[in-house]
Image (cartoon, grey):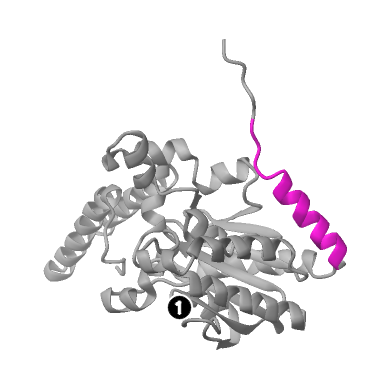
Amino acid sequence: MDRPAYLLEFEKPLRELEKQLEALHQQSLENNIDMSAELATIEAKIDTTKRDIYSNLSPWQRVQVARHPKRPYALDYIGALCTDFQELHGDRQFNDDRALIGGTAFFEERPVMIIAQQKGRDTKENIIRNFGMPQPEGYRKALRLMKLAEKFGLPVITFIDTPGAYPGIESEARHVSEAIAVNLREMAMLKVPSIAIIVGEGGSGGALGIGVTDRVLIFENAYYSVISPEGCAAILWKDRAQAPKAAAALKLNAPNLKELAVVDEVIPEPLGGAHNNPAAAAGALKLSLIRHLGELTPKPVDKLLDERYERYRTLGQYREVAVK
């Protein structure tokens, strides 16, 4: 049975059942005994347990799934959905940020501009990708590619997957806040359709720096938040161990975000998370992208800009309650 080696805490009961199944299957083979009834019973229990676990994930557990090291990253989705991806490098000012990638590609035979935050699979690649945390030059590269897309009339598709922009001294020295702020302004006025997909972590301004788009889609087990649960817990409770409580309070998960009208669509994931069946996750994203691009592409520029303006003027749903 091929399952990811990385095990989340809440998945342990499922792993124990799978070990029982494997042991019983091995016993059946070694002793040449028909144990099909017993195997079927355990398989049914595994299926029931799996559905119980993944259908009732807490906000903190969904954050853990969003951070799963085997979860598909931007390049995985680009490879599954696009052809002829041509990566373009550098911000023409300082450097080439490998945490934020971008370039032209064809999606369903339509030319598009891809901009994406990319994490690494191992320590070496994570150092190269800076753990998916872009620096100022990354956001300036993204803006350069957006302007290139605008020049040639290409829809912009962004993949968001970052714990946040890099907060180091050198990043601050090169004005990361200004770089993100400029992107927010310029994306609001971009004269081509744009779609953002939150595939894993959507942390703070680091995510928003490529997220001011006409449509925002989010995978079922991804999250989008002004701060990480650990950061929120450290501020409010002076204890990072309170992250599960913070995750619930922040309402950072996909169902809450859809209810609050922060995102436009929740993309379903295979049972157990996108890492259990990346092809199915990519297939669900493909259908969603086809639909949204089909709706956005025919719109005149003026209408596109007006609707984007209204979207961000009225972002989020809230209710005022009188305090007695």
Outermost residue, left direction?
A: 31
Residue 223 locus on image (x, y percent): 48, 52
Q: Residue at x 36, y 53 (%)?
A: 64
Q: Along the line of sight, which residue is nearer the eye, 35 or 285?
A: 285
Q: Residue at x 60, y 77 (%)?
A: 114
Q: Is residue 53 left or right of residue 197?
A: left
Q: Any magenta on residue 41?
A: no
Which residue does the numbered mark 1 point to in the structure image? 97
Q: Along the line of sight, which residue is nearer the eye, 145 or 169?
A: 169
- Would you say residue 156 is visible in this rendering? yes
- Which portion, as a residue range, is magenta? 301-318
Q: Is residue 187 above or below residue 93?
A: above
Q: Any magenta on residue 313?
A: yes
Instruction: Quadrant for residue 236, please give it.
Output: top left
Q: Residue at x 49, y 46 (%)?
A: 253
Quadrant position of the N terminus in the picture: bottom left
- Would you say residue 52 is visible in this rendering? no
Q: Is residue 286 left or right of residue 188?
A: left
Amino acid type for the residue under numbered disc 1: Asp
Q: Residue at x 76, y 71 (%)?
A: 192
Q: Along the line of sight, which residue is nearer the eye, 243 or 217?
A: 243
Outermost residue, top direction?
A: 324
Q: Main secondary structure of the magenta part?
A: helix
Residue 82 locus on image (x, y percent): 60, 81
